Amino acid sequence: MKIIKAGYEILDELDGQGILKKIEKCGRVCYKSEDKITDESAERFVQNIIKRGHESVLEHFSFTVKFVCDRGISHEIVRHRLASYSQESSRYCNYSSGKFGNEITVIEPCFWNPVTRQEIEQETAINEPYFGWSYVCEVAEDVYFDLIKKGATPQEARNVLPNSLKTELIMTTNLREWRHFFKLRTSSAAHPQMREIAVPLLKELQTKIPIVFDDIKIGGVD
């Protein structure tokens, strides 16, 4: 069994100034104010439409992110309906094959202190939450492999796999929906493992795309 940390990857090259200029060009049609476009006008225009709540204009630009997370967190992400998704399928992926290293991969819980393989084998950290989690995941892996050997298909055997099973999820959506995503998923009420990927992603986007995400306060504090 392989244990990894959650993560993400932005799959598009993001030209922040180019994005703002496109949004301005689209948005000024509403006011027929194209004559006011200058080399420096895009940032102020986008800032003003966000302040006024005219966020439909932000729907004219989309980008894609690949999340590496556990199945539980992926279920939360796909609840954002105004997005397109592609996801690693446990129906068709046979984790007992060499393609997957003959092992399952699980996402390490960020809220428990990890223990070593030696501590698990010697049961010296048996009272640690991480110990119980790791032990159960390894049992699930053993049972999964046993079911495959007995002729079960991957879509049948997957019923014993843990919620911590690693999945790769592609999400494509527009700037408006990304704003909605970050307002929910970086708040203090969000699941810790959701915040583990959403917070650094928001911080990176705040550096790559000016204005669009600047007003979103991590933790939900205004």
Image: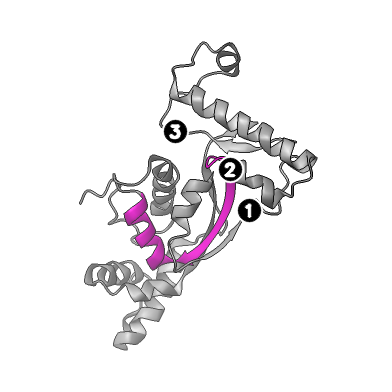
Classify residue 145 by image quadrant. Answer: top right
Relative placement, left or right, of 216 versus 111 is: left
Region rendered in magenta: 162-185
Q: Which residue is mark 3?
A: 110
Classify residue 119 by image quadrant. Answer: top right
Q: Amino acid at mark 1?
A: Glu
Q: CA separation, marks 1 and 3?
A: 22 Å
Residue 33, horizontal then vertical, whole percent: 31, 85
Identify which residue, 47 or 93, lies in the foreground.
93
Q: Which residue is mark 1?
A: 88
Q: Which residue is mark 2?
A: 166
Quick one: label 2 or label 1, which is nearer the N terminus? 1
Secondary structure of the residue carrying numbered label 2: strand
Residue at position x 73%, y 46% in the image:
94
- The 10 Å Cα crowd at callout 1, few under 14, some 14 to 19, many 20 or more, is some
Q: Are marks 2 and 1 in contact (CB under 8 Å)?
A: yes
Secondary structure of the residue carrying numbered label 3: loop
Quick one: label 1 or label 3, which is nearer the N terminus? 1
Q: CA separation, marks 2 and 1?
A: 9 Å
Relative placement, left or right, of 53 versus 89 is: left
